[in-house]
Image (tube, rainbow, N blue to C red):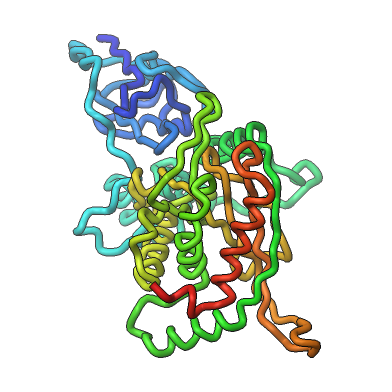
Amino acid sequence: MAKYVFKLPDIGEGIAEAELVQWYVKPGDVVAEDQPLADVMTDKATVELTSPVSGTIVAVHGEVGQLRQIGSALVEFALEGEAPAEPEAESPPAPSPAEPLPATEPSATRPKASPLVRRLAKQAGVQLEDVKGSGPYGRIRRPDFEAHISAAQQPQPSRSPADEFTEVKLVGLRRKIAEKMEISARRIPHFAYVEEVDLTALEAARAELNARYGERPKLTLLPFFVQALVRVLPQFPQINATFDDEAGIVRHYAPVHVGIATQTDNGLIVPVVRNAQDLGLWDLAAEIARLAAAARDGTAKRDELSGSTITITSLGTLGGIATTPVINHPEVAIIGPNRLVERPVVRGGAIEIRKMMNVSSSFDHRVVDGYEAARFIGEVKALLESPTLLLAR
């Protein structure tokens, strides 16, 4: 009986450590080659680690939520026969679930699962659509399938006072979001600015454009906001910027790469519309819709999830009167459209019903002064309230 130690491999992102997100094995388990062992997360993606050998698990090292060093022992095996040679120090990058689905995938809505899980589900007559996956981007693992079968066979327990709460440890993407928000709130001196904008004319223009060009991508308000930003930002280079506070360097960007904060089942993700200044209104609508769909189904590429120079965050119809959005570090500004409402407004001494929106924004006070922020939002407001000027190129 030979012993083999599987070490946490270099997954090709120049990192020194990775977080353990989930174990799929425990001591005593007999595993086959290529069977999933664990999921680990880096700053960019969740990666599934599979077994390089067939054998019996003797020991596992590390708990869920713990950071493990690259090259540290992860799983110990007992093998029949001789142990294989240790892998080279620099192994090729592990595949990332953020890569797009292959062209042969019939639908992005098809449940993500391994061939083993699909075979077990077929044998048991279970629809995978009914199974909740705990893997990256909702991937269904064997423990998920077995838990689903077990729950279906057990009567539902009655509630008791001890069942009033459940403790959930922050791991994986949720933990990364928490860490990034903590960094932003701790290191950036935010100041908020809220302005009301009359979108009556813009909403009329949007409705007319959607009716006249129904074959084109549907226009929401977001493409108009992006258009306004790219028209105004050249006048305010200190706002289309990032701040490396450790080096004390502010980087002003000529292109505008707009992050679109998107809520997904796995948490808040910010895909990036690159070179937004080069895109027309319908191109922006199509790109925003494409990136949001990719973020939600887990097919967004890594370079589509980083590199933004300013971010827009919107709760859509759920939006309230005003928000104080947290800046997407290391950017220096974030824009937050709120809910669009009809309300009475005094115009020329008369009361009219207008479509109004409060637009929230936050700025890094180390880089942007209040006067500059007010001027910037004022210019954005002027374009949004005059769609003919906004659409003129």
Residue 4 visible in image: yes
Where is 115 relative to 318, above or below?
A: above
193 or 379, nearer to the observer:
379
43 or 323, nearer to the observer:
323
Where is 195 relative to 208, above or below?
A: above
Q: Quadrant of the C terminus?
A: bottom left
Residue 124 visible in image: no
220 or 39, nearer to the observer:
220
Report the residue at 52% width, 71% height from top: 221
Say left or right for 82 vs 96: left
Say left or right for 343 vs 141: right
Image quadrant in which you'd find residue 286: bottom left
Report the residue at 53% width, 24% height from top: 246
Image quadrant in which you'd find residue 284: bottom left
Say left or right for 219 vs 5: right
Report the residue at 46% width, 68% height from top: 223
Image quadrant in which you'd find residue 321: bottom right
Q: Position of residue 72 (x, y in %)?
A: 39, 14
Q: Position of residue 210 (x, y in %)?
A: 43, 84
Q: Quadrant of the N terminus?
A: top left
Q: Position of residue 139 (x, y in %)?
A: 39, 48
